[in-house]
Amino acid sequence: MSPSEGVPAAAPDYRILGPLEVGTGASTRLRVAPGRQQVVLGALLLEPNRVVSIAQLVDTVWYEDPPATARTQVQICVSSLRAKLTEAASGAAIVTRPPGYLLRVDEDGIDGHRFAAMVSEATALTAAVRLAEAATLLRAADALWRGPALSGIPSRILQVRAGQLDESRLNAVESRFDLELRLGRHHQLVGEIATLLNEHPLRERARGQLMLALHRAGRQSEALQVYREGRELLVEQFGLEPGDELRRLERAILADDDTLRVAPARVVSTQDRTGRVAPPPAGPTEVPLQLPGDIADFAGRADLVARTEDLLLEGAGRAATRVVVLLGKPGIGKTALAVHVAHRLSFDDFPDGQLYCDLGGTRARAVSAAEALGRFLRALGVPGSSVPDVLAERAEMYRSLLARRRMVVLLDDAAAETQVRNLLPGTSGCVVLITSRARLTGLAGARLVDVEVMDHAQAHRLLTTVVGQERVDAEPVAAAELIEVASGLPLALRILAARLAARPGRSLAWMVRRLVDEHRRLDELAHGDLAVRASVALSYDGLPPDARRLVRRLSVLDVSSVPVWVADALLDDDSQRTADLLELLVDEQMLEETEDASGLRYRFHNLIRLFARERLEATETPGERRRSVSRVADGWLTLAGEAHRRIYGGDYAILRGVEPRWVPGAEYLARVHEDPLAWLESERVTLCAAVELTAAAGLDEICCELAITLVTLFESGCYFEDWEHTHLRALEVAEAAGNRRALAVLRCSLASLHLSRGRLSAAQELLEPVLVEFTELGDVHGQAMARRNLALVDHLRGDLDPALMGYRVALAQFRTAGDPVGQAHVLCQIAQLDLDAEQLAAAETNLVAALEICGRVGSRRVEVQVRFRLSGLLVAQGQFRQADAELAELLVAVRSTGDVVGEGRVLHRLGTVKALLGRTDEAVAVLTEALALRERTMDLSGAAEVRKELARLTG
């Protein structure tokens, strides 16, 4: 998603270049409370549209000694800020994103971002020798500042970040002084530079600029006095002499060196940021210009281009070579980006040319360091007969030749650190840009830049640039579908765009239709020498056999991401080796690593998944694939079953069949134990996908078992569509297998779904034949479940005698089957019949018995249901205060488990009780909340009852 996508229309103007301010208009400021709120907002503003973890925020606020309530206090701060920003911006700007928060904002609305963009643009103008424009832009950028960045905010961490911003301002001001000196404005600059130097007397660059301005203004003695004052300050405070540049400038002023006079602006050489081409300056030797041609229609990477340029150009003058490594998966556009950036670096900065080598790191035979050095030395003018044979000697000669040169070195498709280490210059005059699918973390001092997939806006820009604005505008839906198919991969999108550009008579919809079949999609993603399949194959073929096997088997899972244990199951290996293989696949850009509350997870890019699935179908037998799927499904069933047991106190209230044979490690079971319902909620999409996966594999028993186990989640969260879809899919595979018991179990569960939706006739139509089926199978537990549900149908219809009879039969069958939770549930229903008949003593007996069962087995979920019935008994007994206290406790319990249906019911009764106690205002507030929940869960009859009570109270 692009930084501005989804940003509220009236986003505030955020000001961090000075005291923190949030402006909602030309003259209106939104007040942010000093202290923690300003610290939290400041931290979010420094990382716009990126997640800032709660741990980072805690450190930023308290640094080394946070209180025990630190996380809660941060959450309170964020809640308050969110409310203020929502009010000011007509929409929430702070969103929750594990493991913290993200400030969604148009970055152009942040003065710090605007300042950086203006400085970057000025740098580009300088490289294009548009000096006056660059100086004007830098002066405008400096006008954004209102004082030291984030001044007045009490945070040590923010003070460090603010210091970096302040330093960037000083650098920009000094860069403007350089430009204006080149433009001959030395007379006007003297006072301005002197003011800066008075505030920052140790800045040697500013001191040299003042000396030069004074010299050019004919004030040579004053220029030398500025030098002497600076030298005395350094010697007195630090015992140091001025730097080389300042000493050389002093000698040049003493000698009245002609080079200090204003020189005419140089003409841009080679292909620069403006795209203009001119011959390089003449010299005694030919300047090597080895870069491949830039892409004329390069589009969609402006932020990444600017960031890479900044990293290459920052710190000029240091002793070390500046090295930037562009990392990314196959087809992500690393080479195109690197070539584009290298061409944008001006000949003013790097007048001695460019060196380029495709190292072939993903090919069967990569280019060795010795071979690459041989090419570079010849390009630098060394005769072939003089190139040393020994690698170390070639590297020494190469570094010596580059020591006095300023060059751009581009090393494409590097395999490992050992391949490039000898290709790095030894001094700071040169910059090195490397592309690789490996992370190359062993290169000391290298800056790593991850090249991610394009967001929708960037992809749309690329498509428009290649295909044409008119064609894209004419078919916006088809254009969006093409972008979605490419999944942000520039190579894929460029192939599609190139094919359309070559066929101007074809519509975009024509290309979309050709891409519908996933089995042929990679065939379509090829044009000329461009092919997604070939690009991915280079990485895949270089993997060890076990890693290739894991890539293939992971492709069978149609889920967004998976935890480590899934890889263990696919390979049937729970050793550390599997985790190592996953890390290797991340390093080789075949997988992406992510993290959530459950720990590390791994995911595919969609097109890499298609490639891996092709290899899976071509390499592994159907039996091998089925066994891999079975182990993964066993793991999910183990964890989901454990969640059910924790909620219900055992394998109760569920018709279990097969036991899983593959079990994830104890650490994953422990995560389920922490909060079973929350775990089910977090893995809901993946668990539903597992039902689909097992159905596709024809694993009828485990498919049925998974679907049934997930009812715990579906029921509490009102995921009725998931409930229906998973059960219908499991029914298909059970019918195909002729699995009578699985069919009966699934239909009995679907009847419960109908009951939850108030569809009594549909439930009865399923339950009557299911009861017959369970009876023929001799399944007492199944009979108990079916009879209980049929009794509930009678109960809801008002047929109380048949309902009571059915409940009593079900109760006996649950005892025979050894399901105490089933017994508790039935006792609870019988107690309700007693309450309706005003047999309060009988109701109390049954409810106490049910509550004792729940306490004994630890069934928290059914215990809440029993206590809800008890609150009804207390109301019937006229014990309204006790009922109010009981319901207040129940409300906390249902909210802690995310049971929205139970919450709606508890709120409804609580509102009724408060009305009986004469607390009308409280009753109206609680009932209003209950109405919203009952409408949200589509409980239409319950909502109607709440409306009646509200009308009576407010009437």
Image: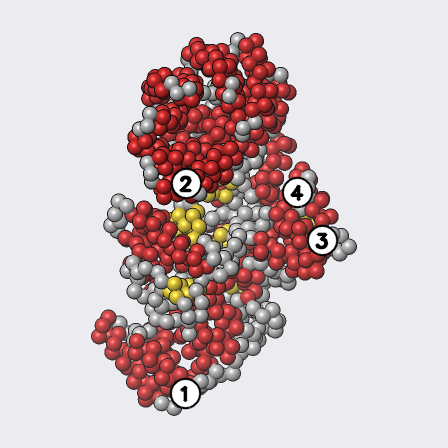
x 28%, y 45%: residue: 69
SS class, disc 1: helix
Residue 767, quarter of picture:
top right
Q: Is residue 527 visible?
A: yes
What residue is shown with label 2? 953
Q: Which mark is residue 500?
A: 3
Q: Earlier in the sequence, mark 1 or mark 4?
A: 1
Looking at the picture, which amino acid does disc 1 mark? His
Q: Which mark is residue 522?
A: 4
Q: Is residue 284 above or below residue 338?
A: below
Q: Which mark is residue 187?
A: 1
| Pick the front one: 944 or 482 | 944
Q: Is residue 728 above or below residue 77?
A: above
Where residue 456 sits in the image (x, y, percent)?
Answer: 58, 53
Q: Earlier in the sequence, mark 1 or mark 3?
A: 1
x 34%, y 17%: residue: 841
| Pick the front one: 739 or 579 | 739
